[in-house]
Image (spheres, rainbow, N blue to C red):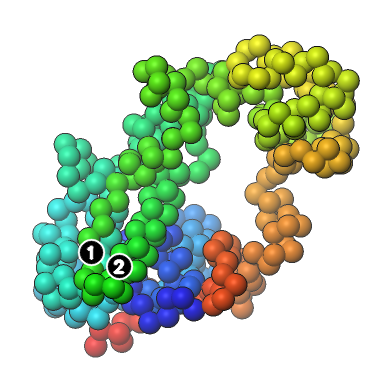
Amino acid sequence: MKLTGIRVLDLTSFIPGPYLTMALADHGAEVIKIEAPGGDHTRHIGLKDGPDTVYFRNFNRGKKSVVLDLKAPADRDAFLRLADTADVVVESNRPGVAARLGIDYATLAARNPGLVYCAISAFGQDGPRSGRVAHDLALEALTGVLAANCGADGRPAMPALPLADYLASLQGLSAVLMALFARSRTGRGDCIDIAMQEALLSATANVMGPTMAEGRQPVIAHERTTGGGAFYRWYPCADGRIALAGQEPKFIAALLGELGRGDLIALTREPGPQQQPVIDLLTAFFAGKTVAEAGALLDRLDLCWGQVKTYPEALADDQIAARGFILTDDLGRRHLGPPIRFLHEPAQPSLRVPGLGADQILIE
């Protein structure tokens, strides 16, 4: 596999760090999860379908577990010995904590110059808010994402996914791999500073037009992808819901032409309230169709659309099944497979979930 021979020390919990390091493990890296004596927080959060919580195993399969109290000198020394053998360290402490513990980049790199060290935090390692703790919802609020995630009543809705967590993780994964690539040429590691706030804000690029061009907040209900486009919204059907998700002129012309309302095409050239007659037409049309009937028509016209599914329906999706994305372990538990697919050296994820301290022998 691509990362066979790479040793990673994972000092993180919750989502940003563990999602990053699990991706490395799926592609061959040896990931050693360093846990405090009480274990990762997510060992105790949410439902279990076996010896572990679903939350914990969804982010930590394929890793090893070593228990260390990094405030204890003997355990800190054990960690330093492990770090001497590591290629990557990922941590998500509040800035300053790693230095107080004596496990910061400067300390570790002095012993292991080739080390790639990735620090993920809410606000980054410097700046006026760097010492403040925060989780995803606070960052979605601070970046404007929550204010833009409004329901029909114009009020912010609770986000379904912790986007700051996942985006910081993916930016961190990219950075770690870039640093490893650079090290293959120079022999020198690097220190990576990932701020969840910046990772999320960087992902607003496609909706920043009104703000960057005119200095104003977008009118959420009128913008192209947040309610102002008749061909980018969901509609009720007789037995469910579908989402139209393609606003290219050819898609619009195909459906409105099929419905005999080509006269409405001009209303869709720009997003905004002038598209309401188109929305009304499509609302009435889809209300009289089952999801299967609507889907058959949209497929015939080669339009972008999707059925609005529940999570259980999503896991049973025929496309997901055909690609074997849902994996099953020896205990019959389901796992989400690796989304990165290589033709050569594909992922071979281990579905083993580490018991707390199960690999303590590694530091003896």
Labels 2 and 1: the sequence-earlier one: 2
Quadrant in the picture for residue 103:
bottom left
- In the image, 187: left or right of 343? left
Q: x%, y% of residue 353? A: 48, 73
Q: Are marks 2 and 1 in contact (CB under 8 Å)?
A: yes
Quadrant in the picture for residue 341:
bottom right
Q: Residue at x 58, y 29 (%)?
A: 225
Residue 190 disc label: 1
Residue 182 disc label: 2
Quadrant housing the C terminus: bottom left
Q: Could one spot residue 60 in this view of the protein? A: no
Secondary element under disc 2, as helix, strand or loop, is helix
Q: x%, y% of residue 130? A: 20, 43
In three-dimensional space, the C-alpha distance between marks 2 and 1, rounded to whole angstroms, equals 9 Å
- In the image, 328: left or right of 37? right
Label 1 packing within 10 angstroms: few (<14), some (14-19), many (20+)? many
Quadrant in the picture for residue 172:
bottom left
Residue 94 disc label: none
Secondary element under disc 1, as helix, strand or loop, is strand
Mark 1 belongs to which amino acid? Asp
Q: Nearer the viewer, residue 168 or 262?
A: 262
Q: Nearer the viewer, residue 19 or 361?
A: 19
Q: Residue at x 25, y 53 (%)?
A: 193
Q: x%, y% of residue 229? A: 64, 23
Q: x%, y% of residue 45? A: 44, 55
Q: Nearer the viewer, residue 27 or 11?
A: 27
